[in-house]
Image: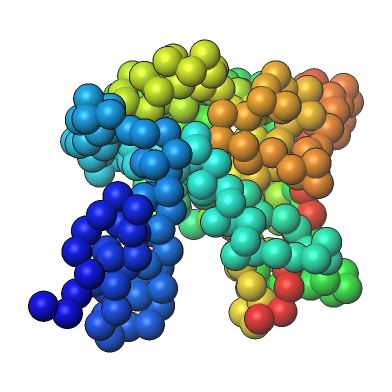
Amino acid sequence: MTGELFSEERSAEVVAESFAGTPDPRLRQVLTSLVRHLHDFVKDVELTEAEWETAIGFLTDTGQTCTPTRQEFILLSDVLGLSMLVETINHRTGGTATESTVLGPFHMVVSPARELGDDIALDGKGTPCLVSGQVTGPDGDPLPGATVDVWQTNEDGFYDVQQPDVQPAGNLRGIFTTDDEGRFWFRSVVPRYYPIPDDGPVGQLLAATGRHPNRPAHLHFIAQAEGYRSVTTHVFVADSPYLDSDAVFGVKDSLVREVPVVDDPARAAQVGLANPFRTLTFDLSLLPV
Ligand SMILES: [Fe+2]
């Protein structure tokens, strides 16, 4: 016999060694590190057998809560800050481009293509808001033909995929293509803060730890342009509650915008919104590939 037998002291090394023959070097690296950290964690807290069983039950429930329109594992990753950490590591901008944030669990369907100026509030409910911006490279050069994929909640704090019997499909989502100056604009409503779904295992975790499930009001964006790195991000509404305690840690200072009221009947008529309305401007700067 050549292999070292399992022992409490050398457990991580013994299990890591079992992966030594993994042909893919990256897979070998990831599994070896995972085992080291997992074993360190169990030793650190001296995990009991009952706690191990609870953990297995929790992860099983998490998987069984997933459906085509609900991703409980992404929620779990989100509330542990894991999604934000992976996102942040993989999209370092050095301060020269729009910062990214989490994709979130509600980008479940392909949004419909829209024309500039379209109203994406298909049910006509909520506080009207004109959303506009420009997609540019890092030096401010406009990017015509960029696509801007947008999704947001209604004024009650729900996405269309959460309320298929209440909201029309495609409500408050759309994919826009920027004009010759890289600009986009559309009509919508002001989104509201909302709780992440908290009627499953992740909600139980939050309740057990005294955490609230809310996210501050935001619009999701994915901006893409040929030859540039796409950015997945949000713009946050500056007067929303929970900006300083987002349940998924998604807020970055550079992504918060005021959403001022415009009380100007002529301007409202021009843009096709009821007066008064609010305006949100969010420019996106992309880095070259
Ligand atoms: Fe969201």
Q: Is residue 178 left or right of residue 122?
A: right
Q: Is residue 92 left or right of residue 165?
A: right
Q: Find residue 23 and report its image quarter.
A: bottom left
Residue drawn 62% across the image and 49% down it: 101
In the image, residue 232 sits, relative to residue 32, either above or below, namely above
In the image, residue 48 sits, relative to residue 117, either above or below, namely above
Residue drawn 17% across the image and 79% down it: 2
| Residue 248 visible at all | yes
Q: Nearer the viewer, residue 197 or 18?
A: 18
The outermost residue toward the bottom is 23
Q: Find residue 265 and report its image quarter.
A: top right
Q: Quadrant of the C terminus?
A: bottom right
Q: Nearer the viewer, residue 194 or 118?
A: 194
Q: Nearer the viewer, residue 10 or 118?
A: 10
Q: Find residue 283 and report its image quarter.
A: bottom right
Residue drawn 66% across the image and 76% down it: 228
Q: Is residue 194 left or right of residue 245?
A: left
Q: Where in the figure is residue 144, as x and y percent of width and height?
A: 72, 72
Q: Quadrant of the N terminus?
A: bottom left
Q: Is residue 172 left or right of residue 91?
A: left
Q: Where in the figure is residue 113, as x and y percent of width and height?
A: 49, 57
| Residue 268 visible at all | no
Q: How is the image coloured?
A: rainbow
Residue drawn 30% across the image and 50% down it: 8
Q: Nearer the viewer, residue 110 or 68?
A: 68
